Image (cartoon, grey):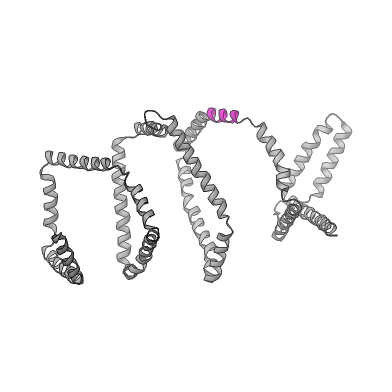
Amino acid sequence: MSTVNNKSESVKREREIVDLLSKMVGEAAKNSRIKHVLVTVLSNAVKPWSNGNYVKRTLCAQIVKIISAVLKSEPSSTIQIQGKDIGRLITLLAQNANARYAQSPMHMVDHLQRPLSDAVQQIDFGELKELLDRAEEPVVELVKNLIGLVWSHYPAKLGAVLTFMHPLGNMAVKSANEIVKPLNTITPDLFADLIFSILGSIDGKAIGELYNRVLELMRQIHTGSLLQGEHGISHFQMDLTNKLREIQSGIDPELYGKAKVIAAEHREERASARADIMMENPELVLGLIARYAAIQNPRIRTIGRKVSVYEGLPTDDFAEAVWSGISPIDTQGIAGIVNSVLRLVNGVHEHKPELFAHVIRDIVNAVDEDELKTATQWIFRDIRDAITPLADTVHETIAEAAGE
């Protein structure tokens, strides 16, 4: 009985879909432009059949004439397809799809796998690759010629195209604002429940498996790079070095240096702009300062939580893990870095012995002595008062160490 009802419902849906499509096509045909297109397509379709035969040609002409008369239209008429009809059509199509999936969950696979497989089998991807390789130069030349034409004869048009960014950007921002605005009216608990329900429906295990696949790809690339490398240098490093060398050969060093200076100045300008805004809005700055502890406390608790994880580990295992992690550190490499830095500093001092003294002297001379004296007095006094409770413990420890 259920099967019969489902079949009956499916037939009703198909009829309603046909009725809606017919209504939309009929409404669209009222437009003179669309009517002309339909009549032209019909004439072109029957022309091969009637070609060379007077009777057929006359019959086709009458058919086209009748259809053209049936499709009444007005030059100023506009297409008036009802939005409710479009909504109903989408709903019916979704219901049909759901009914098919209910009967056969693999309905899409059954109907699309074979034709898609045949299409992939027949496509020669080598030919596509060869096409792209050969199209590179002519496509670049075409773009070059078009841009040259625009710049030479129609520069205003290019400027007009660039001005499109202004209204498009405004539309995007204002539209996003209208989309987000209704969300602010939802109660916090309902909105949180909605978001968390969406997050909860995401298949976390599948994400973990995808992450594993990506990590395995990274491992494969790394291993393959090491296997194909030469003289202890990985294949990736060799290719990257060659590519960077190739890129560097096309860079103007003088222009690159100027660009770095410009980027630094832009950072300064952004910082200055933010400072100006903060000076104009002292309540914003005061609010942030007043909430400094509230901002930092979560970070402190996060660090404490991480440390508590280490503290909860078995002491022997933790000590062994720390030993295994720290003991292989390249101490020679660290010492080499220190030595290199010292050699660099000594070399600079040898050629410019006044440099460091000059920099330090300028900084010292610029320090306000009165402010430094005041700060030094209260800092050391506060430190002394703060560590006074620990004085006895420190004295005992020092005495014990001296006795040993």
Quadrant in which the N terminus is drawn: bottom right
Span colored in magenta: 123-134
| Residue 101 rendering spot, x and y as whole percentages | 73, 52
Q: Residue 270 occupies which quadrant of the picture?
A: bottom left
Q: Is residue 149 above or below residue 267?
A: above
Residue ID at (85%, 41%): 62
What's the magenta bit mostly, secondary-structure-wise?
helix
Q: Nearer the viewer, residue 309 or 246?
A: 309
| Residue 39 rendering spot, x and y as whole percentages | 77, 43
Please state if 175 lies on the left or on the right of 65 as rendered. left
Whether the magenta-drawn stretch holds residue 131 is answered as: yes
Q: Is residue 314 above or below residue 33?
A: below
Q: How many marks?
A: 0
Q: Residue 283 occupies which quadrant of the picture?
A: bottom left
User: Which residue is situated farthest in the right direction here?
Assistant: 55
Whether the magenta-drawn stretch holds residue 107 is answered as: no
Quadrant in which the C terminus is drawn: bottom left
Residue ID at (31%, 42%): 259
Q: Nearer the viewer, residue 106 or 25?
A: 106
User: Which residue is situated farthest in the front direction here?
Assistant: 404
Q: Is residue 12 visible?
A: yes
| Residue 15 rendering spot, x and y as whole percentages | 81, 55
Please state if 273 lies on the left or on the right of 60 as rendered. left
Q: Is residue 73 visible?
A: no
Residue ID at (52%, 63%): 180
| Residue 117 rendering spot, x and y as whole percentages | 68, 37
